[in-house]
Each structure stands twice: as C-alpha cells, then as structure tokens.
Image (cartoon, rainbow, N blue to C red):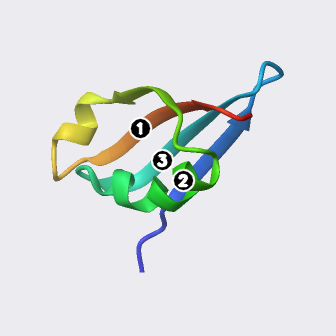
C-alpha cells in the first residue's frame, strides 16, 4: 500500500495550507476534495508543482484556503 501524506498548516491569519505528498498526477485533487469542502471550499490559490504534471513522479501540491 502506498503512503499518501497531507500536511495541514493553519496560519495565524486563518489561512489553511495543504501539502500533498506521495501521490502521482492530479490524484491529490481527489484526495483533498472532502477536506477542502470541510474548510468551506474557499480556495485562494492552488499551486501544482512540475512533478504534479508528470504521472510517474511523486506530487507535491499546495492548496491555500481561508477559514471563516
């Protein structure tokens, strides 16, 4: 079984940042969908790394949302 990791950072100003590791391609979007919904689906930005666009390389994605 593959290890998928989601790192959640909550900043003092209320921004929430998600970083996904161990996922190929854009599967991170499926993995974080429920978490994004729980945070209110207020996506400020989404940064896909170059690795995220290569299906054979592990992906790191940063998603920033604001709680409130």
- Using the image as rendered, state which of residue 22 and residue 35 is in the foreground: 35
| Residue bearing the label numbered 2 | 37
| Residue bearing the label numbered 1 | 61
Please tell me which of labels 2 and 3 falls first in the chain: 3
Q: Answer yes or no: do the residues labelled 2 and 1 have beta carbons within 8 Å? A: no
How far is disc 2 from disc 1 in space, using C-alphas?
17 Å
Q: In the image, 62: left or right of 28?
A: right
Residue sitting at x 45%, y 56%: 33
Residue 63: x and y, percent?
49, 34
Residue 31: x and y, percent?
43, 61
Q: Answer yes or no: do the residues labelled 2 and 3 have beta carbons within 8 Å? A: no
How far is disc 3 from disc 1 in space, using C-alphas?
5 Å
Q: In the image, 45: left or right of 10?
A: left
Q: Residues within 10 Å of mark 1 (few under 14, many from 20)?
A: many
Q: Nearer the viewer, mark 2 or mark 3?
A: 2
Q: Is 30 situated above or below 68?
A: below
Mark 3: which secondary structure? strand
Q: Residues within 10 Å of mark 2 (few under 14, many from 20)?
A: few
Mark 2: which secondary structure? helix
Please tell me which of labels 3 and 1 falls first in the chain: 3
How far is disc 2 from disc 3 in space, using C-alphas?
16 Å
Residue 55: x and y, percent?
16, 51
Residue sitting at x 47%, y 55%: 32
Kindly indicate the quadrant of the structure image that contains residue 17.
top right
Please tell me which of labels 2 and 1 falls first in the chain: 2
Kindly indicate the quadrant of the structure image that contains residue 59.
top left
Residue sitting at x 66%, y 43%: 8
Q: In the image, 34: left or right of 55?
A: right
Residue 38: x and y, percent?
62, 55
Q: Answer yes or no: do the residues labelled 3 and 1 have beta carbons within 8 Å? A: yes
Residue 20 badge: 3
Residue sitting at x 30%, y 57%: 27
């Amino acid at each position: 079984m593959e290890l998928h990791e989601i790192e959640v950072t909550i900043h003092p100003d209320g921004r929430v940042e998600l970083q996904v590791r161990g996922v190929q391609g854009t599967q991170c979007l499926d993995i974080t969908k429920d978490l994004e919904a729980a945070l209110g689906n207020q996506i400020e930005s989404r940064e896909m790394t170059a690795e995220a666009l290569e299906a054979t390389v592990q992906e790191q994605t940063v998603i920033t949302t604001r709680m409130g």
